[in-house]
Image (tube, grey):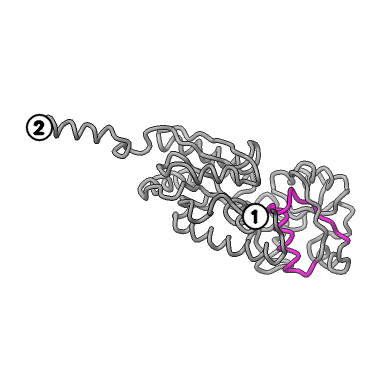
Amino acid sequence: MRAIVALLLAYAASPGAQIFPAKPLRLIVPFAPGGGNDTVAREIAQQMSAGLGQQVIVDNRSGAGGIVGAEIAARSAPDGYTLFLGGVGSHAVNPSLHAKLPYDPVKDFAPVALIATAPSVLVVHLTVPASGIAEFTAYARSHPGRINYASNGTGSSAHLAAVLYESMTGVQMVHVPYKGLSPALVDLLGGEVHAMFSSMVAIVPHIKAGRLRALAVTGKQRSPLLPGVPTLAESVAPGYEAGSWYGLLAPAGTPRDVVLRLNAEVAKALRQPDVRNRLAAEGAETIGGTPEAFAAHIRAELLRMGELIRRARIRIE
């Protein structure tokens, strides 16, 4: 009898028998603090901490366009205590942009939930002779190579949004990559470059102040932040859709019950009106859904972005 009791006590004390979660969780964000990824991560982490009864600690691991953080997450123990904020860069762009990648976006991760999507907005300097997207597209078509556009780096969502626009409208522009959004925005405001696809939060104040002109947004529907600005899909490029998305993932092999528990906590967080409002203020639309739906989204985005990158012959060695 004593032997049986001892075995039961040992089992109850073992990590596998503990009710999840039994300790704080780590959420790896593959970018520096302060950007859209970090904002989404901290909002979700705060809500999940309350629901799980354990703190979810945001761990910013920036570098190499998200590769550093993604590799750390992929190699972590599949126990549910290490999570990763993935996105279009880490899970749809990098696999086609780089010749070698230290992680597999499908095999090395267990999708938990798609959190939100965030469209961009096409803005131009006030000297550009176009008051709307149709006029701009017509001008750019008739002046190939005369319009230059900024981005926050080769292969960034801003760059690929422009490449997609060019491919769907027959426009030929000149790409000017910068090391980050801030220097690109400085030159756009100064008229050194003509146009840019930008995140909403960074650019809306300049639009409202009359320093830049908004022509179109890149999502499926108009943005509440710029309700008077049409989508590219409704105006000059039917079917067009681009921008960022954010999702929660765990290392591959994480137990199914743990994934479902985490998914339920994300769903609970996204139902909170204050969470939806705060993310909307960042230009993001909350999504949610099942782990299977998120997995399907990743596969579809891999195909879509991969085809675009190959056609445009974009590569980072």
Asked if one can make out residue 278 in the rendered structure from this viewpoint, the answer is: no
Disc 1 from disc 2: Cα separation: 61 Å
Residue 22 part of the magenta-drawn span: no
Asked if one can make out residue 30 in the rendered structure from this viewpoint, the answer is: yes
Q: Residues within 10 Å of mark 2 (few under 14, many from 20)?
A: few
Residue occupying the point 42% across, 38% down = 51
Q: Which residues are magenta?
A: 146-171
Compared across the picture, whether 181 is left or right of 272 comes to right
* SS category of the residue bearing label 2: loop
Question: Looking at the picture, how far across and down is residue 242, in whole percent?
Answer: 66, 58
Residue occupying the point 82% across, 42% down = 186
Residue 4 lies, with reference to residue 97, above or below; the image says above
- Rendered image: mark on residue 98: 1
Residue 46 lies, with reference to residue 223, above or below; the image says above
Residue occupying the point 29% across, 35% down = 14
- Rendered image: mark on residue 1: 2
Question: Looking at the picture, how far across and down is residue 75, in whole percent?
Answer: 49, 44
Decide which of 50, 205 is in the foreground and name it. Answer: 50
Dividing the picture into quadrants, the one containing residue 59 is: top right
* SS category of the residue bearing label 1: loop
Q: Residues within 10 Å of mark 1 (few under 14, many from 20)?
A: few
Under mark 2, the amino acid is Met
Residue occupying the point 73% across, 61% down = 163
Question: Looking at the picture, how far across and down is residue 57, in whole percent?
Answer: 51, 34
Determine contact: label 1, label 2, CB under 8 Å: no
Under mark 1, the amino acid is His
Q: Earlier in the sequence, mark 1 or mark 2?
A: 2
Quarter of the image with the N terminus in it: top left
